[in-house]
Image: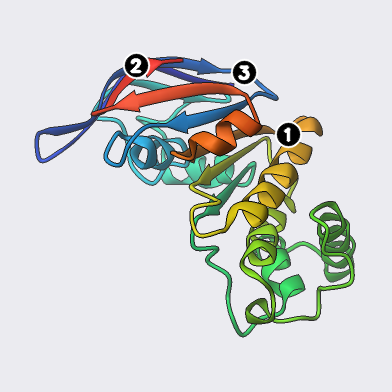
Amino acid sequence: MIRLYRVSKEYAGVGALIDVSVHVTKGEFCYISGPSGAGKSTLLKLLYGAIKPTRGKLLINNIDMGPAKDRDIAHLRRHMGVVFQDFKLIPRRTVAENVGLALEVLGTPREVIGRRVAAVLSIVGLRGRGDELPLSLSGGEQQRVAVARAIVNDPAVILADEPTGNLDGAMAIEVMEVLQAVNLRGTTVMVATHDAGLMQRFPYRTLRFRAGRLEAS
């Protein structure tokens, strides 16, 4: 599903990722781990097409991200969900409106949006909370809304960048359990984190980076 062949990414001649080769299969759950500055966020940005490799080849669903045109990347993103550390919810829109935004942009009929939003809110444990505003929820609940938004269009892959970084222990576990449940439904999940405790509690394959290099996979 995701293949990197000797991928490097440089900024002003400095290597953020260096000669990385790895394969992530469909339906896999894996961590992207390493200290600050190891290259975790750079890898995620490459995967969702925000930046392009300096060298090497990156294939996602057989699309070569290097020469891919903007329309190809836009099409790929329709099958990809992204979860950020700081939630990125719109405070003046309800939970349901935040979750349904991606479907609204795609021109999905309103009744279909309503059904799908209700279904994913149930999956993340927020049934009946669609009319509330994000700031009325706890941090863990807001992150679950962000996960619901990421999965509402039934993506093939979810990329999560430090999704528990702003949460306490109990809330972090709740969010990881939701991501685990999504993975069990067949979605590929890649989580960037440096939380060793969570990785021990939820043991999956770990892609470990240091100074831009893949040390273990």
Q: For the point 50% across and 59% down, which residue is it?
A: 166
Percent across and percent down for residue 191 are 54, 38
Label placed on residue 215: 2
Identified by mark 1, the residue type is Asn
Which residue was labeled with disc 3? Answer: 25
Percent across and percent down for residue 171 are 66, 56
**Nearest the camera: 199 or 68?**
199
Q: CA distance from mark 1 to mark 3?
A: 12 Å
Task: Assess disc 1: are there few (<14), some (14-19) or many (≥20) residues with their C-alpha within 10 Å of its C-alpha.
Answer: some
Query: Mark 2 and 1 residues: CB-CB less than 8 Å, in contact?
Result: no
Q: Quadrant of residue 24?
A: top right
Q: Quadrant of residue 200?
A: top right
Which residue was labeled with disc 1? Answer: 183
Q: CA distance from mark 2 to mark 1?
A: 25 Å
Q: For the point 89% across and 71% down, which residue is it?
A: 128
Report whether residue 62 is seen. no
**Nearest the camera: 109 or 177?**
177
Percent across and percent down for residue 119 are 88, 56
Q: For the point 35% across and 26% down, which residue is it?
A: 209
Q: For the point 56% across and 32% down, which residue is it?
A: 199
Secondary structure of residue under mark 2 = strand
Percent across and percent down for residue 208 are 41, 24
Instruction: Describe residue 181's horizontal placement relative to residue 58 as left or right.
Output: right
Q: Residue furthest left?
A: 13
Task: Assess disc 3: are there few (<14), some (14-19) or many (≥20) residues with their C-alpha within 10 Å of its C-alpha.
Answer: few
Task: Assess disc 2: are there few (<14), some (14-19) or many (≥20) residues with their C-alpha within 10 Å of its C-alpha.
Answer: few
Mark 2 vs mark 1: in front: 2
Report whether residue 60 is seen. yes
Q: CA distance from mark 3 to mark 2?
A: 19 Å
Identified by mark 3, the residue type is Thr
In the rendered view, tell whether residue 189 sits above or below residue 214. Answer: below
Query: Mark 1 and 3 residues: CB-CB less than 8 Å, in contact?
Result: no
